[in-house]
Amino acid sequence: MATPEASRIPGGLGQPAGRVYNFNGGPANLPLPVLEAAAAELLNWRGTGMSIMENSHRDKKVVAMALEAEDDLKSLLKLGDEWKVLFMQGGASMQFAMIPMNFAADGAACDYVNTGMWSDKAYKEARIVGADAAFAATSEPDDFTYIPDTFAFRLNSRYVYITSNNTVRGTQWRTFPRKPPAPLVADMSSDFLSRPLDLSDFALIHAGAQKNVGPAGLTIVLIRKDFAQNGRKGLPHMLDYRTFIESDSMYNTPPVFAIYIAGLVFKWIRHTVGGLDRMALRNEAKAKRLYDAIDGSGGFYRGTARPESRSLMNVTYRLPTPELEKKFQEEAKGRGLCALNGHRSVGGIRASIYNAMPDDGVDTLIEFMEYFKAANG
Amino acid sequence: MATPEASRIPGGLGQPAGRVYNFNGGPANLPLPVLEAAAAELLNWRGTGMSIMENSHRDKKVVAMALEAEDDLKSLLKLGDEWKVLFMQGGASMQFAMIPMNFAADGAACDYVNTGMWSDKAYKEARIVGADAAFAATSEPDDFTYIPDTFAFRLNSRYVYITSNNTVRGTQWRTFPRKPPAPLVADMSSDFLSRPLDLSDFALIHAGAQKNVGPAGLTIVLIRKDFAQNGRKGLPHMLDYRTFIESDSMYNTPPVFAIYIAGLVFKWIRHTVGGLDRMALRNEAKAKRLYDAIDGSGGFYRGTARPESRSLMNVTYRLPTPELEKKFQEEAKGRGLCALNGHRSVGGIRASIYNAMPDDGVDTLIEFMEYFKAANG
């Protein structure tokens, strides 16, 4: 695969194949070499004479491909054999229900940290299925502008649930609670694989693919096998994590194409980027340049999250007026800087700069921000 | 899009791009023009400068694409507004649980017709979630070689569940029970869109995409709105059909790429094939030629299903010995006729000839069968 620098053309327009810089919150941009590889073999995958979409999931080559993706992911995250990688469906919203169904629907306590819309949704599903869910902390009174650092954890809690990165508000956990009374369960949908992780306090991590992993329709779940074994019995097969563990995610037909793309992305991170340490350095550098541009704008651009809680994935900010924000988005789009609108629930500007956003995309955005401020400030 | 006849090259080998004839039971082959269209715009969909995988599901063009797919499907099936098309995830196995969870988990009666592995799995999930599920008929004593035609339906049943086509045993419902005491619910995963349907007795139909619709990871559900409204309350959002109805299947991020491919397939059936009547004629003609070859082989090839219950999608047959079956599969593969193995639970030969299998694929297989019989008979 070519390196991502193959797409390096200053100015924003004129990228290969008429492509734009895509700041979507998710589904988000994918590494260009991954898309090129997929397009090249879409009619004939690995000499099988069939598309990867047409190969049986029971075929040896497909099984090997899925296991290879799992191995690459375990290698990236340095996961030991106490962990299992699952390829699931239904997105984070299905996990919001499945987690309490498996671990707390007998009325057990489980603690949630409320950092915005997604953790609130997760909490509500836990209540629906009969868990004794409670907020151990919430930043709601301050409009979710920060990540809490003090928690009222209960000693009888089955798990502590957090959302590691909040796409709507642009906040991110930089460090996780140390030695919580119960294992951590995290929705890492929007910063999965953006940095190395110390998973010693975790029992389950879920991540919708459509930010840093692959196409929508695939949910990555990392689960400690001992945690899964202690789950409730008597659930439908597709709602029991053990079904997926025992079948290597192939109890029924998995989303093969999405797993295939995810596998290419894992290899891109491993071999082109050079692993999660280097991925994190890239992400930190990209985010720093963009936040510096915001902070150095003399107040024309204003970040919405508190500096110590700022997300490296979703950079959220405001302009002096909603009218200027609209103008900003429209002019940016004309220069190939697309999807800079904030989440529909909060408005403003959101530049999502996930793993696959090239340096040039960020630099072109910064250039445009300077130009726009000069013209409208 | 080119017509499927673009792939017409006698002999089996030498199809475009080194493609083979793919008799997989599922995931199965897709129409070549659909794959070609997807490959051509994989890096830049409809001039957006992004892959369809990178576009937000909230983007107007993506919402319009999904609604267009829904409209095309409703038009193909002549569905009235009392029906809703849902784009879901999790495959038939998730539906096995969701259907009784929504409609019978309060201990209500629901009747199942047992025609093989898939209906048996559906029945078992209903028992797991607490429904009073019972078999109204079963062909198990005769090794599932036929579709029953007499049923012990209960008058208090909430629904009658059937599997319209049985991929493992090669049987298919040619006509459905008339005026059952409860609405029909059907798993049509493996013959969906292969023929026109009179849905007046039905309330819900589900179909995994990976046979006649698109890539694995998408489940099509057709549901009568009034049936859904009477479902049980208090379920997790992702397990309640109303969530999907009210959000046009976009409560959370749907499997956009799979919906996009399905939309291309719907257009291929509508405009290239000419609708479901013509699709059915093609399928009947293909299956007839293959069954005639089996029946005319003087007993060398033996069909496993009773003639009146034979599937037009999965043609299952045996050779005189398992050794010959293995040799048959291997030699066929060498000629570009792939994946002719029977389901791993029953063995034998299975030629899956779904919508996208071109006439030439079937004719090439028949030629090979004649050659193989002459050489080994």
Image (cartoon, coloured by chain):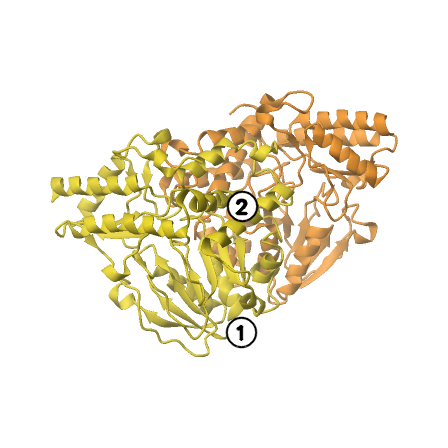
Chain colours: A yellow, B orange
Q: Nearer the viewer, residue B114 or B371?
A: B371
Q: Residues within 10 Å of mark 2 (few under 14, many from 20)?
A: many
Q: Nearer the viewer, residue B40 or B212?
A: B40
Task: Give the residue at mark 1.
Answer: A106
In this image, A348 relative to B160: left or right? left
Residue A72 in the image, given as x and y percentages of width and height? 50, 49
Q: Nearer the viewer, residue B328 or A199?
A: A199
- Amino acid bearing label 2: Leu
Q: Quarter of the image holding residue A248? A: bottom right
Residue B164 in the image, given as x and y percentages of width and height? 68, 45
Q: Secondary structure at mark 1?
A: loop
Task: Give the residue at mark 2.
Answer: B218
Q: Quarter of the image holding residue A56? A: top right
Residue B313 in the image, given as x and y percentages of width and height? 69, 37
- Residue A205's place in the image compared with A332, above or below, is below
- Amino acid bearing label 1: Asp
- Residue B298's place in the image compared with A307, above or below, is above
Residue A203 in the image, given as x and y percentages of width and height? 48, 65
Q: Chain of mark 2?
A: B
Res. A204 visible in picture: yes
For image coordinates 46% across by 47% down, the residue present is: A266
Q: Marks 2 and 1, Cα distance to the nearest angstrom?
A: 32 Å
Farthest residue toward the bottom?
Answer: A155
In this image, B11 relative to A66: left or right? right
Q: Chain of mark 1?
A: A
